[in-house]
Image (tube, rainbow, N blue to C red):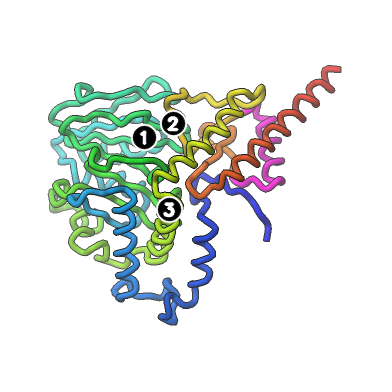
Amino acid sequence: MKTVYNFSAGPAVLPSSVLEKVQHELLDYEGTGMSVMELSHRSAPFQQIIDQAEALLRELLSIPENYHVLFMQGGASLQFSMVPLNLLGSDETAEYIVTGSWSGKAVKEADKVGEIRKHTPDAQTAIPSYTAKDFSGNSRYVHITSNNTIEGTRFAEYPDTGDIPLVADMSSHILSEKLDVSKFGLIYAGAQKNLGPSGVTVAIIREDLVGDAPDYCPALLNYETYVKHGSLFNTPPTFSIYVLKLVLEWVKEYGGVEGMEERNQEKAHLLYSYIDQSGLFQNHVTEANRSLMNIPFTANNDEVNARFLKEAKQAGFEFLKGHRSVGGMRASLYNAMPIEGVKALVEFMKNFEQNEVKEDQHAFN
């Protein structure tokens, strides 16, 4: 089998041991004689799967008892609509800190529901600090995208919103570093980065924020529906939840969130350190706001970028092309990316740079 390193921003790399277990259990899940994909979501085996997934997530993130854990579909993009539909009345105000593409998409959906006050940093390469005095006391919530996959930025510290609930899209870095859930009213995350495969979305919501959706809110867009029915009001993405459970078991086995954070810091340090001393590649993000998960970088012109991407793919480094809105390259270092992959990428970048220098010298001579 061909060996590659998958640096995709999502759907992203999964632990090889998880994929092997999926393969082993694919035709017969724990003696049922059926694949997980064939199990009824009303069956005892699947109820055990979803219960274990919730219990593991609660353990790994130390989720307080007054928070619900929900499994849904639609990705973070559906949450862009669900959040205001549940938390914001048509005559009420919410505040959005717009730090990149995804928070920009979120605010567009919220604008359809109520009054939105936007906070937009001057630069896309840095995120300022926010304190309670930056927000209106009558706001229903403050929304952030805590890690930006496209721009490669993250909040160095989360906003202090006082008594206003803080809502965060954590799709691209949940489980990658320690987190105090109690500082948030609602956290949501598409699974396809650190939690599992695409198809399932997790929401962690404080219980006092459930139950106030207007009557016109559709049942499947109402958090209360999922709370009352244990995320089983309709058929959930059963196979994705099963794989998510296996990923959570893997995270626990390898040191929990603390272990993930330690390895992620090491991986990011390796790549950033090389880029910072490179004469060819650059990363333009302010150091304090650099993402541990998504590292964009670029050479000095588009022709060199294209040559790098072509040669990298030939060498087994997949999905390094940067988002079309920013160009260049991007390496996503999610939990399941082994440190060996980052070391191999850095070595490849060094060799590529050396060859570029030789080519330039040859052309000059």
- Looking at the image, which residue sits at the far bottom? 33
The residue carrying mark 2 is 153
Q: Quick one: SS at disc 2?
A: strand
Q: Position of residue 344 (x, y in %)?
A: 65, 42
Q: Nearer the viewer, residue 220 or 329?
A: 329
The residue carrying mark 1 is 104
Look at the magenta stretch and give its main secondary structure: helix
Q: Position of residue 236 (x, y in %)?
A: 33, 64
Q: Nearer the viewer, residue 21 or 166?
A: 21
- Of pointers 2 and 1, the one earlier in the residue sequence: 1
**Cα distance between the residues tagged 1 and 3:** 31 Å
The residue carrying mark 3 is 251
| Quadrant hosting residue 119 | top left
Neighbours of disc 1 within 10 Å: few (<14), some (14-19), many (20+): some
Residue 300 visible? The answer is: no
- Which quarter of the image is occupied by the C terminus? top right
